[in-house]
Image (spheres, grey):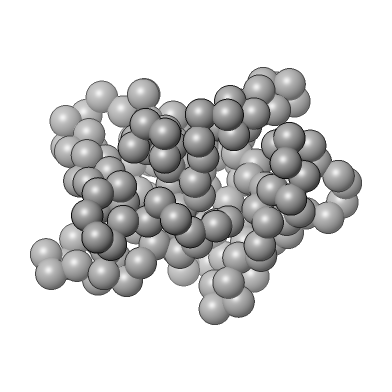
């Protein structure tokens, strides 16, 4: 499957700590996200989605996960204290913690994304659930390919 997408999910300090605690409890370096809403239908089932973890309290990207667009109703997951956020569960086998990114080029890409996601009148802090990255970022005037960049980033840091 060659089609990949980029989406965001939002945390505050409390929900990010709940997320990390849950990952530590189940002893995984993979990613698992709970959402009150399903991922939009125009993203095909079984497609790969890079999920940018936005910490709205810090205005920082904390990580990027790679999930498959497939809801996991196989069991009840208690990732977050607010059960509404545990309604739809999406999993992936890869997650890159941004603190591991040392390459100046990729650090600059993350810095630019933080500016676009957290600042200005078109910021992305208010959405709910896992939402596709807006087209104004994906189809930018510089023709920068964020999907290709994320592919290379994951290949470099998560072999």
Look at the picture and state if 53 lies above or below 18.
Answer: below
For this view, does 128 lie left or right of residue 59?
right
Residue drawn 51% across the image and 40% down it: 11
Residue beneath the point at 39% across and 62% down: 133
Which residue appears at 22% of the width and 54% of the height? 120
In x, y percent, where is residue 92? Answer: 61, 46
From the viewer's perspective, is 58 left or right of 37? left
Coordinates of residue 95 in the picture (x, y in percent): 51, 37
* Direction from residue 47 to residue 143 in the image, left or right: left
Foreground pick, 116 / 110: 116
Does any portion of residue 149 appear in the rendered image?
A: no
Which residue reaches farthest right? 75
On-image quarter of the C terminus: top left
Which sits in the foreground, 44 or 156? 44
The residue under the point 31% across, 56% down is 123
Q: Is residue 116 above or below residue 29?
A: below
The quadrant in which residue 107 appears is top left
């Amino acid at each position: 499957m060659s089609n990949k997408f980029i989406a965001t999910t939002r945390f505050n300090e409390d929900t990010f700590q709940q997320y990390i605690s849950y990952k530590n409890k189940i002893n995984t370096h993979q990613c698992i996200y709970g959402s009150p809403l399903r991922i939009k239908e125009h993203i095909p089932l079984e497609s790969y989605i890079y999920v940018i973890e936005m910490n709205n309290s810090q205005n920082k990207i904390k990580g990027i996960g790679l999930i498959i667009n497939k809801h996991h109703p196989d069991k009840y997951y208690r990732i977050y204290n607010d059960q509404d956020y545990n309604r739809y569960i999406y999993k992936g086998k890869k997650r890159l913690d941004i603190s591991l990114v040392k390459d100046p080029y990729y650090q600059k890409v993350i810095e630019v994304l933080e500016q676009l996601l957290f600042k200005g009148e078109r910021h992305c802090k208010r959405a709910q659930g896992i939402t596709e990255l807006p087209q104004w970022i994906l189809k930018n005037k510089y023709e920068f390919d964020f999907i290709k960049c994320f592919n290379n980033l994951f290949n470099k840091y998560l072999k």
